[in-house]
Amino acid sequence: MNETVIEGTWEEIRAQEARLAGHRVRVTILDSDSRAAAASEERFAALTAKWRADTAHLSSASAIAMHPAYQEIIGMGAAALPFILRELERQPDHWFWALHAITREDPVRAVHRGKVAEMAKSWVEWGRDRGLIG
């Protein structure tokens, strides 16, 4: 089954009534919070892609963290936390500076410092404990 997504206000969707006639249609109503979250997630994904592309060749943690896209993600504040934590769970990476900057916390035990996979696990568990990710 092919699926076409049509987004817009109800009035904009109704204007396409003739085109949609005879087709099976599913409607999802997005409240303003859902639209804002979707926009934030898209912004996060674009910034993450830019950050990764531009810093792939760098070895300095501070240079990686000072990249403008990374700094912009930090600027998103708490809204970025679920995105960062899901990304960290999917693909451990150097998100620790951003997480600490946003939360002012550090759940990583001393024995795990410098071990990206272990540090990622600590932060993901921290996020689950706070209901930020499932």
Image (cartoon, rainbow, N blue to C red):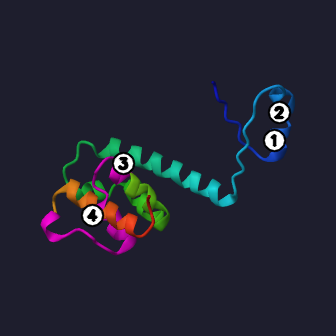
Dot 1 crowding, Cα within 10 Å, few <14, some 14–19, many 20+: few
Magenta span contains residue 97: yes
* Rendered image: mark on residue 122: 4
Residue drawn at (84%, 45%) of the image: 11
Image marks 1 and 2: residues in contact by CB distance under 8 Å? yes
Vertically, is 97 above or below 14?
Answer: below
Residue 96 among those drawn in magenta? yes
Give residue 63's position: percent from left, percent from top: 26, 56
Earlier in the chain: of badge 3 and badge 1, it is 1
Q: State the residue position of label 3.
A: 51
Is residue 94 toward the left or the right of residue 48 in the image? Answer: left
Spatial CA distance of label 1 from label 2 is 7 Å
Magenta stretch, residue numbers: 87-112
Q: Are marks 2 and 4 in contact (CB under 8 Å)?
A: no
Q: Badges 4 and 3: C-beta atoms under 8 Å apart?
A: no
Q: Which residue is mark 2?
A: 16
- Quarter of the rendering occupied by the C terminus: bottom left
Mark in the foreground, 3 or 1: 1
Q: Which residue is mark 1?
A: 12
Give the CA distance from mark 2 to mark 4: 49 Å
Q: Earlier in the sequence, mark 2 or mark 4?
A: 2
How far apart, in angstroms, are the residues tagged by discs 1 and 4?
Answer: 46 Å
Callout 1: SS: helix
Location of residue 65 in the rendering, given as x and y in whole percent from the top left corner: 30, 58
Three-letter amino acid code at disc 4? Ser
Q: Is the residue marked by circle 2 packed among few (<14), some (14-19), or many (20+) residues within 10 Å?
A: few
Which badge, 2 or 3, comes first in the chain's sequence? 2
